[in-house]
């Protein structure tokens, strides 16, 4: 009986070692990047958008998911950093998109969240402007992807698989 148990322990150890060798190889072969975006709505039904200093246009807040971070942690971090926003509802996954424009391995998870702003978000080296906007009065320069995602959320168009 003890020999059988020792055999199972040996198999488990080999399995763990094999996984540690295979995972880095899989990353090189099939690695992908993962990002999150949030459609953040206030009590008036307005959506929060940001204008970055380093790219043109208005965007839904978001960013990359860091190593060791869950997507929910990432979404809370991004809305806090980009808008001083606090979720008052649980983030609800709307859709997963493949973002071929950035990188053929990039995927974006879009969440819908009800929020409140805890303090004004002043401009800095990353965020030029931000604010809440009525859906029928979005700022000039809202990106095509932003407009499409909002139309999808409102049910005006079919949800796409590509960002």
Image: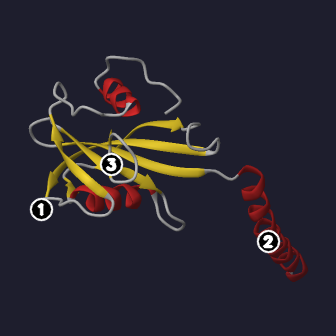
Mark positioned earlier in the residue sequence (1 or 2): 2
Mark positioned earlier in the residue sequence (2 or 3): 2
How would you rate the neighbour count of disc 3 (Cα within 10 Å): few for under 14, some for 14-19, many for 20 or more?
A: many
Is label 3 in a helix, a strand or a loop?
Answer: loop
Is label 1 in a helix, a strand or a loop?
Answer: loop
Q: Residue beneath label 1, please? A: 119
Residue 119 image point, x, y percent: 12, 62
Residue 92 image point, x, y percent: 34, 42
Q: Nearer the viewer, mark 1 or mark 2?
A: 1
Question: In the current view of this chain or complex, which residue is farthest to the left?
Answer: 44
| Closest to the observer, 24 or 144 | 144
- The structure residue drawn at horizontal position 74% and vertical position 62%, both measured from the top left corner, is 23
Residue 117 image point, x, y percent: 14, 55
Q: Is residue 112 above or below residue 127?
A: above
How would you rate the neighbour count of disc 2 (Cα within 10 Å): few for under 14, some for 14-19, many for 20 or more?
A: few
Q: CA distance from mark 3 to mark 1?
A: 16 Å
Residue 40 image point, x, y percent: 25, 44
Colour scheme in the image?
Answer: secondary structure
| Closest to the observer, 136 or 18 | 136
- The structure residue drawn at horizontal position 42% and vertical position 54%, both measured from the top left corner, is 63
Q: Residue beneath label 3, please? A: 61
Is residue 120 toward the left or the right of residue 144 in the image? left
Q: Please tell me in which quadrant of the rendered image residue 149 appears.
A: top left
Mark positioned earlier in the residue sequence (3 or 1): 3
Q: CA distance from mark 1 to mark 2?
A: 52 Å
Residue 52: image tag: none
Q: Residue beneath label 2, please? A: 12
Q: Is residue 130 above or below residue 94?
A: below
Q: Please tell me in which quadrant of the rendered image residue 85 appears.
A: bottom left
- The structure residue drawn at horizontal position 41% and vertical position 32%, both measured from the top left corner, is 145
């Amino acid at each position: 009986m003890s020999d059988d148990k020792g055999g199972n322990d040996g198999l488990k150890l080999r399995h763990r070692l094999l996984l540690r060798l295979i995972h880095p190889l899989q990353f090189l072969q099939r690695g992908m990047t993962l990002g999150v975006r949030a459609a953040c709505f206030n009590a008036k039904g307005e959506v929060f958008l940001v204008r970055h200093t380093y790219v043109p246009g208005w965007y839904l807040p978001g960013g990359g998911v860091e190593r060791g971070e869950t997507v929910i942690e990432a979404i809370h971090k991004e809305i806090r950093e980009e808008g001083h926003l606090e979720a008052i509802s649980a983030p609800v996954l709307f859709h997963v998109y493949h973002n071929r424009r950035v990188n053929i391995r990039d995927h974006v998870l879009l969440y819908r969240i009800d929020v409140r702003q805890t303090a004004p978000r002043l401009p800095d080296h990353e965020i030029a402007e931000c604010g809440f906007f009525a859906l029928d009065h979005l700022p000039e320069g809202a990106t095509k992807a932003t407009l499409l995602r909002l139309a999808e959320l409102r049910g005006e168009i079919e949800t796409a698989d590509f960002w």
